[in-house]
Amino acid sequence: MFLGLIVFAILAAVAMTIALRAVRSLVRRLTGRDKEPEDKKDKKSSSKEEKKPSEGESKKEAKSAEAKPAPEEEEEAQETIPEETGNRYAMAVRVGIFEAFSPEESDFKIDEKALADECVQGSSLSYLEYNNRELAGDDFLGFNLIVEEGSRMVLTYGGSAVASMTVIERQSTAIINGETVSGTMPGYRINTFPPELKPGMVVGDLERMLEAAEHIRGLQGDPVLVSRAMSTFFTEPENIARLKGSIDRKIQSKESVNKSIEASRKQAQKGPGKQSGHRQSHK
């Protein structure tokens, strides 16, 4: 019996040793999967930090990507001049300032009142707008008219002359009582100018200037037709809409100031003595 107890104790000790070894092996396996050595973890984490950009860099890259358009978008954003328009512009620059003279028999007169009536009746302009058209200024991208009674008419675009018609004295000869007599007579010099390109203009602006100059050049110096052409380009519906948008608020402010000045002038004419007497009569 004593021998049996010894054998049992030996077997129990062996079994416990085997069990402890199995547990340790299992623990090592688990810790080996879930936990790496510190030096390996440090290396991996540092490599990840090197690859991953900072939050600020990410935002900068995102903004630059949004701000910079794709090559296709850049090409679309830049308006290209059609080949035909480019050729016409190049030709206008080569021609330079074109000049023609009216026929000797013309009796046309530059009449500012008649021109105002023609422009107002042929468009949605009011006389107040026509008479204040110069308020548009040189930054107005549209046609405008400069008229000097009896002497000059100029069609402008963006403040630059497109065409002009000026009264001149021309040499003339006449046969009176069988004799040739020399003298002078009034006539007109008609000029057209190459388009002047300015910031803010688009292809449509260039085409409108070219069209006006080319049309007036084809009128062979007839002052009646030139004057009518100038007023027609000026009173085009699109041009009048642009002009109204440019000057109407300015006219409104100008009229308000004029009204205030007129009221102050009338008040000054009454004088302080009259005002005080008027007040005393009511006491």
Image (cartoon, rainbow, N blue to C red):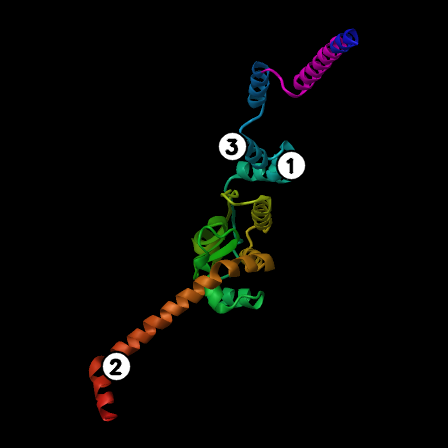
Task: Name the residue type under label 1.
Answer: Glu
* Magenta-highlighted residues: 10-37
Q: Is residue 89 above or below residue 158?
A: above
Toward the top, the furthest residue is: 3
- Looking at the rendered structure, the kind of residue marked 3 is Gly
Contact? badges 3 and 1 (CB < 8 Å): no
Element assignment for label 1: helix
Q: Which residue in the rendered view is the most extreme toward the front?
A: 1
Q: Number of callouts in the render?
A: 3
Cα distance in 3D space between marks 2 and 3: 73 Å
- The circle drawn on residue 56 is 3
Instruction: Identify the residue under disc 1.
Output: 83
Whole-angstrom CA distance, mark 3 to mark 1, is 47 Å
Q: Which residue is mark 2?
A: 270
* Secondary structure beneath label 3: helix
Front in this rendered view, residue 250 or 172: 250
- Percent x, y of residue 131: 45, 65
Q: Can you tell which of label 1 and label 2 is closer to the viewer?
A: 2
What residue is at 58 percent from the left and 36 percent from the top?
66
Residue in front for this viewpoint, 107 or 279: 279
Q: Which one is nearer the viewer's eye here, 161 or 206? A: 206
